[in-house]
Amino acid sequence: MAFKLNVNGKVLSADVDGDTPLLWVLRDTLGILGPKYGCGVAQCGACTVHVDGAPMRSCAVPVEGLGQSKIVTIEGVGASAVGKKVQAAWSELDVAQCGYCQAGQIMSATALLAEKPTPTDADIDEAMAGNICRCATYTRIRAAIKLASGQKTEA
Amino acid sequence: MADGSQLPSANRRDVLAGAGLVLSFAVVGKAGAAEAGGAAGKLNAYVRVAPDNSVTIVSKNPEVGQGIKTMLPMLIAEELDVDWAQVRTEQAMNDFATYGRQFAGGSMATPLHWDELRRVGAAARMMLVATAAQGWGVPATECTTASGVVHHAGSKRKATYGSLATKAASVPVPDLKTVPVKDPKDYKIIGKPLRQVDTDAIVTGKPLFGIDVVVPGMLYATYEKAPVFGAKVAGADLAAAKGVKGVRDAFVVEGGAALDGLLPGVAVVADSWWAARKGRDKLNTRWAEHPTSAQSSTGFAAKAVELSKAAPGKTERNDGDVDAALKGAVKTVEAAYAYPFISHANLEPQNCTAHFKDGKVEIWAPTQNPEPGRQLVAKTLGIAPDDITIHMIRGGGGFGRRLMNDYMVEAVWISKHAGAPVKLLWTREDDMRHDFYRPAGWHFLKGGVDASGAVVGWHDHFVTLGENGTAARSAGMSPTEFPARFVSNYRYDLSMMPCGVPTGPLRAPGSNAIAFVVQSFIDELAHAAGADPVAFRLKLLGDKPMVGEAPSGYAAGRMAAVVKLAAEKSGWGRTMPKGSGLGIAFHYSHLGYFAEVAEVAVAPDGAIKLVKVWVAADVGRHIINPFGALNQVEGSVLDGLSGALHQAITIENGAAVESNFTDYPLMRINEAPPIETHFIKSDNSPTGLGEPALPPIVPALCNAIFAATGKRIRQLPIDTAMLKSG
């Protein structure tokens, strides 16, 4: 059946079964390839997108429940001031190794900073523990979040 | 790059020859210089300069997150004498004739290319200088270069590389062996921290990865294989799968018996991957009995103990008289160590896009090792290797998994059957249950120390997986592995048992397990001797700077230096609070010398807090890209800790039990400790950093746990239940 989805500020149509996870609607139907498949069971965070501002694992969100929700992916996150700052920090510190998880990391970090502009280490642990980085760039992820929030990073 | 059809084709370099300078070089020592100007043959092509003075530098090796697409072009750009801002880098096609071997493995890119690619850049610069000098009628020796411009001070003339490039392309190619290179003090690019060339594409979510490849008319596929490795398909409800909306086809692939080839399975091809997956859920595949279907991890472990008590299959090394030395030792220690199978768990599951058409194949593969993939596809499908084109697509993590090409041959087979381009994507469960695992292994050790605290005897009966005297892939151990040659009475016995579980290289193969065993047991001997673990290790390393000869020489002096530095930086010897401890370990692998100290705090319930890690490393006189280098070291350390704390693939009934991150956890940010890295820039040629930082962290952690708790970890992953004190 046809769904109308609000993705990155545009209304897009997708003719898919209602139980199709948002991740696969984005990737295979709409050609929005930034969100990645890693586990399919909301364990790794590579598919993280924002649904009405909240970070969600799109691999575990059936498309039929989304209604008019505003969906933002890595492709659209730079439109917000916070998202743009996070991307700039990720770039400045060259956080990525393979880079596969980083779209999801940036989405989670942006959601964190939108809610807590100056997060503590504990805040970072809590908000980011749902995102696995197999290359283990965690020290730079932490530093980039602090940089984006204007906090001094430890040497 | 999402649109695979837009990627440069294998023949593009010929087309571009007219657009600017294409430098083609004979590979040193491989092709004759006379061939260098020829149209075909063993030529390399790395550098193009456009009229606007922008420079394109080709990166020959696959990128899987090790930063090679940045690092290799840095070497060329340095000697070409251009500004990094002028440079655009481009991923090469898989093209053995032009580039030789193209692979991401063994931390070999730096040692293999450090000299050669700098000379490629230097030769290109020389051709541009010669062209300018000739045009101005001045000696080339009076010309200088900077930022992609040739200058002649005497006549105050200058010319951009871009204005010279077309003419320079016809200048004879200088001999790479004799072309002069820069004095390192003049380096402007090597040694500077540079961001990865694809960083901005990564942070904005551009489609860069294998999973992102889109080819016009492409279908999506999933491929189900037997839980017992290599078992054949006995039956499947193909019609039920085909009845699912969007499914185009479902079919059985007979496959073969080789675990690294095309295995039997059932393919489902659909309009979307989700439809393919839903179709697969209806298959209800039945699998044939298989000879290895009774194998298990507990069975392997029991067999290892049994073999350890019997005469070894073979004695790999026998120096001095171990039995006599142990008899005469003041203290002896006997211990059994074991480690499990572990999975690579690349975050991007294995995938490949292939288009079989008219007997030819085009492949888009996130592979670390394309050439053997080409050969596998050619052999399995009866295609000429030259009729196969392979695009090397960025991989979402390598770690050795993508050195194998099973996903590639599957994708090609399915595309041929489907009559369309196909993107095959494995599920996470497929990926974890069909890996080439780090092999499990068992070491039965005896060691002794004398009154002076010296190791006088070392006996390792290593029980590994393998048959007929040949160890399974990545399951061997070299007879020169430390502490061979450092202990005068040393025996290494080897026994094997057959195994139906596919094994293969995982980041620092061999070393990632052997360092745990050797460096933990050294710690046991140090404590038996009542010696400080650092002092004990330095004594074992001895006074000779080099032990043995190339290629298996061990630079004991370099190792002693990093041990001392790691100890110094970590404040070794300081008083630790109750439940806290420092542990040290060192290991040489992939030409790199690493010593690492871990600080841990163990809670009464056995929970381990990783407080901090110090790394001291010697990989030669230059750290080519410090930004990338630190990332590799930190990633390797956390990778090792993640495995030691959490990971095991358990075999039951011939199959892997774990299937996703729910039962095979990876380290998360809340566990990751800060890491302090120090490089010693010794006067040695630079070597690689993708692997050698991993091995020592595992025993450093275990030795720290011992220091904190008095409990010795002899089996991985670490069982925190045994650390309970409250």
Image: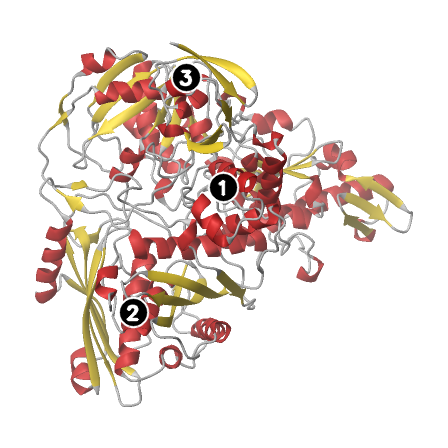
Label 3, on which residue? Answer: B218
Residue at the spot of label 2: B520
* Residue A3, above or below B371: above
Q: Residue B268: x and y, percent?
A: 27, 19
Residue with the mark numbered 1: B61
Q: Residue furthest right?
A: B155
Name, please, the residue furthest toward the bottom.
B451
Gap in Å between the C-alphas at discs 2 and 3? 52 Å
Is B343 on the left-hand or right-hand side of B133? left
Closer to the N terminus: mark 1 or mark 2?
1
Q: Image height check: is B723 above or below B367?
A: below
Residue kind at label 3, given as amino acid type: Met
Residue A23 screen position, x and y as percent: 41, 26
Q: Nearer the viewer, mark 1 or mark 2?
A: 2
The quadrant where residue B163 appears: top right
Q: Secondary structure at mark 1?
A: loop
Q: Circle 2 sits in a helix, a strand or a loop, which is it?
A: helix
